[in-house]
Image (cartoon, rainbow, N blue to C red):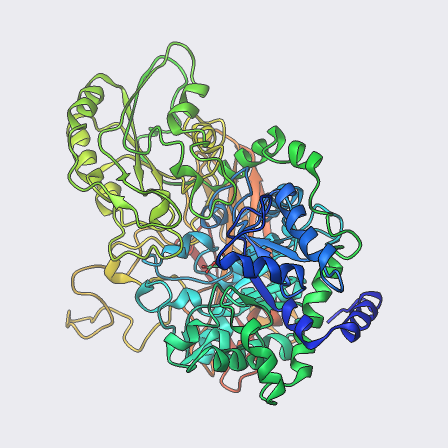
Amino acid sequence: MNLDIDIEKKVEKLLKKMTLEEKIGQMNQYNGSWDVTGPAPDGNNREKYDQLKSGMVGSMLNVVGANAVREAQKLAVENSRLGIPLIFGYDVIHGFQTIFPVPLGESASWDLEAIELSAKVAAKESSASGISWTFAPMVDINRDARWGRVMEGAGEDPYLGSKIAVARVNGFQGNDLSDGESIAACAKHFAAYGFAESGRDYNTADVGEHTLRNVILPPFKACIDAGVATVMNAFNEIGGIPATGNKYLQRDILKEEWGFDGFVISDWGSIGEMIAHGYSKDCMQASEQAVNAGSDMDMESYCYINSLKQLVEEGKVEESTIDDAVRRILRVKYKLGLFENPYLYCDLEREKTDVYSKENLEIARDVARKSIVLLKNEMDILPLKKSGKKIAVIGPLGNHKDAPLGSWRAKAIENSAVSLLEGIKNKVGEDVEVKYAQGCGLSQGKRNFLFEVDLIEEDKSGFAEAKKLAVESDVVIMALGEDCWQTGEGRSQTEIGLPGSQMDLLKEIHKINKNIVIVLMNGRPLTLNWEEENVPAIVETWQLGSEAGNAIADVLFGDYNPSGKLPVSFPRAVGQLPLYYNYKNTGRPDKHPEGMVFWSHFTDEENTPLYPFGYGLSYSKFDYSKPTISSNNMSMNGSVKISVEVSNKGAVDGAEVVQLYIRDLIGTITRPVKELKGFEKVQIKAGETKTVSFELKQEDLAFYGADGTFKAEEGDFEVFVGGNSRDVQKMTFSLK
Ligand code: BGC
């Protein structure tokens, strides 16, 4: 904990002046569900409105825009007894109005500077529009592509996930939270939300201490060390106790052990949901359990505001517990400069110039192309020539201007993305004929944040036109994948292949023209076995945001050499899930020598993923030399240095993500077969060779072992170097 003495004094002084009711008010957050710029609302919202004026609300979410926030802020500051400013939160997940790639896609860049910059731009835009707090980054590790929220995180690996989490926190929060262009970040969802059984959203998570400590918590701890201002708890239960009422997580680990000095916000209504979980009999008990467990602010369950006073009076909750929560909330508000100027984030001028600017869109395009992963490229079909060809763009995502914006899109303007077709047309010369046929539909009916997507199942009416176009064309770019509303909150699926009629369309076109480049747009890993077997080129573009089409065209036509690597394993079949590269070996890992069935495998599918974690191709060809290790022995206070020479044997300059993995062969707790412990994204010119070195120290080998302490254990290690988690070269050393 690194407290600012000046702020602490102010917090204490203010706290002394506050009544119990006013304190509880600070712990109450409401959704802005009426037009705050209009007249006072009626009905249910009237009470919220009156409470804002009487200091019974500490924060609002979903009130956005410099004008709206100013109006809502005025209600609190000008009417309440102490004039304490509100903090305004919003889900700024991958951009505010300039939309960046969905977080999973952006993570495929493995480019921490680019990721930090994207969060910084998002903060700049939000802070001009009234927002001082984002509910991001989501740092939930996830190994199950059925879960719709896989699109919102950084994938399956705690090491990569931690680095990306810190980059995002730094981008949002900047160097000084009160500089007016930075906003408070929120690490979420604490904890194990990404471990929902069968990937079904909100489902039970039941993980042991070992997985909790070594896999789930590291990105949260990294955020705390980076000074994240807030943490959001989670909807799920873990080990029988809802995360929201979990004292072990929130008080013992987060606040005590890690010294977190910011505040914990509940997830939407999650305090009240403890009743349905069967953990609390009513809101009164839920409040008692949540506040005592360390949940400081109630998002929209109305439990705190209606019960904390009575709980304190009855002695079920200590007033010192309330004080602790309020101290944390006020501390963040002071840090944000809200007390000095409650309207700091409501600059109408800046809102005009800083939001959705040309400059921001250029940054979004750069991050977008860095996020693209080339999964397959045979017969050198890519990059495409910019002249003298007939290009067909076929598929329901070919001219979609909305799906590339992704889920959790904050203030994105509907249908504002550059479509793939537009991007290609912007790119090629006059003599290139680019024609489009949709082929089949993507979804119908309601398409937005609130509703399930209605997939078009049997729609083949557009096949004929698409087939005709394929006959006439030299190359077919097939734009396939998911509607953006197929991923995100509440969007879990049991099947993860191409939805609707897309697979049939692809097969039909393939019969006519084999020169196919699949451009995938999706928010989760997909099963792509047929595609991998039959189609020469596959480009994973996720949902790339505002500049999607331009960024994809940059890659398709070779103006940008793809450099992304998968932050998640792509399964061969949904039945393999959960699937991740850092799995445990089991007692029966190997195929039985005499062909018997008794080993850990599936009888109808391989164990391995189709595309492994860390995988991605380039237009360059990178050759790895035999790596070297400085010593085969390492002392506890020493280190080993691993070096490898990487040569670009291709004809074009490129970037390669060189990856280092370890395996701790024997542990007091069994260790994964591989663990990422270092990576470096290096630019290598055509014909050039670069040496990449990594240093491993004791802390890189440490984990929470059988006695619960975080330390490295003596013994033998393997160390692997390569361009993905599968194709690696191995060395060994011992830690003594
Ligand atoms: C989500 C959170 C989000 C909150 C506020 C919840 O449903 O789980 O991640 O921040 O809503 O929109």
Q: Residue at 82%, 67% (x, y): give it.
A: 10
Q: Nearer the viewer, residue 686 or 502?
A: 502
Which residue is rendered at x = 64% and y = 46% of the image?
130
- The residue under the point 27% across, 52% down is 496
Q: Position of residue 692 (x, y in %)?
A: 58, 50
Q: Quadrant where the N terminus lies?
A: bottom right
Q: How many marks?
A: 0
What x and y, as percent, mark residue 597?
16, 72
Q: Does the image show residue 11?
A: yes
Specify whether 582 is left or right of 263.
left
Q: Is residue 598 left or right of residue 188?
A: left
Residue 328 percent across, percent down from the top left: 69, 70
Q: Is residue 223 above or below residue 290?
A: above
Above-or-below relation of 486 to 223 = above
Using the rendered view, name the quadrant where residue 382 is placed.
top left
Q: Nearer the viewer, residue 38 or 452?
A: 38
Point out the residue furthest to the bottom here.
Answer: 315
Name above or below for residue 106 compared with residue 138: above
Q: Residue furthest top?
A: 431
x%, y% of residue 348?
69, 37
Q: Is residue 684 above or below residue 130?
A: above
Left or right, 546 with respect to 466, comes to: right
Tell me the residue at 47%/77% (across/down): 283
Taking the image as drawn, is residue 711 in sight?
no
Q: Specify whether 250 is left or right of 414.
A: right
- Where residue 489 sits, quadrant-wise, is bottom left
Q: Quadrant of the C terminus?
A: bottom right
